[in-house]
Image: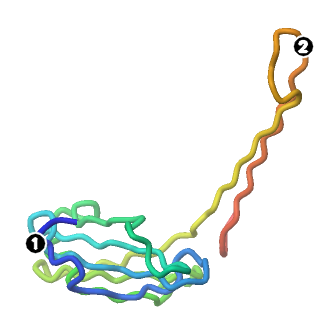
Amino acid sequence: ISTGGRFGSVLATVGDLDHDGYVDLAVGAPLEDGGRGAVYLYRGGTGGLGAAPPQRIAASDVHSTLRGFGGALTGGVDVDDNGYGDLAVGSTFSDHVVVMRSRAVVTVITSMTSSPPALTTDEQIFNVAVCVQCTGYNLRS
């Protein structure tokens, strides 16, 4: 977050992007990066919003001509009918609107066990079990 970037001049709830039961927030900073702009996404939780944004979308990551990206925000509408709210971001100085379609949020949990639990020079057989569990809302195979 840079000084003079007008961080927080535009706010929009974007629905529950990660389907954790809490509303998430988009925060515009239209003058960051020399006037190109950026949008920060914050996850909601039991204690409110997280202290640090898990995602920053810079205008330069979207298109080279955008200026004032994040000067207007609206979210929470599922434009592509995939079960996740999408975000429209206005670039006020370049007269563009970008629709950012949300994708599935996937949680991956891994675990590994071995038998015996520690390998010694006497062991001739060493078994390893690896488990991967993926969960998410409305995942497509």
- State how the image is colored: rainbow
| Residue 91 in which image quadrant | bottom left
Q: How many marks?
A: 2
* Residue labelled with disc 2: 124
Q: Residue at 48% of width from left, 74% of height from top?
A: 102
- Residue that carries the numbered disc 1 in the rendered image: 4
Amino acid at the residue labelled 2: Gln
Q: x and y percent of residue 35 in the render?
A: 10, 70
Residue depicted at 52% across the width and 70% down the height: 103
Q: Position of residue 2 (x, y in %)?
A: 17, 65
51 lies above or below 86? above
123 or 137, which lies in front? 123
Name which residue type carries label 1. Answer: Gly
Point out residue 108 in the picture as x, y percentages from the top left corner.
65, 56
125 or 117: nearer the viewer: 117
Q: Residue furthest front?
A: 47
- In the image, 66: left or right of 109? left
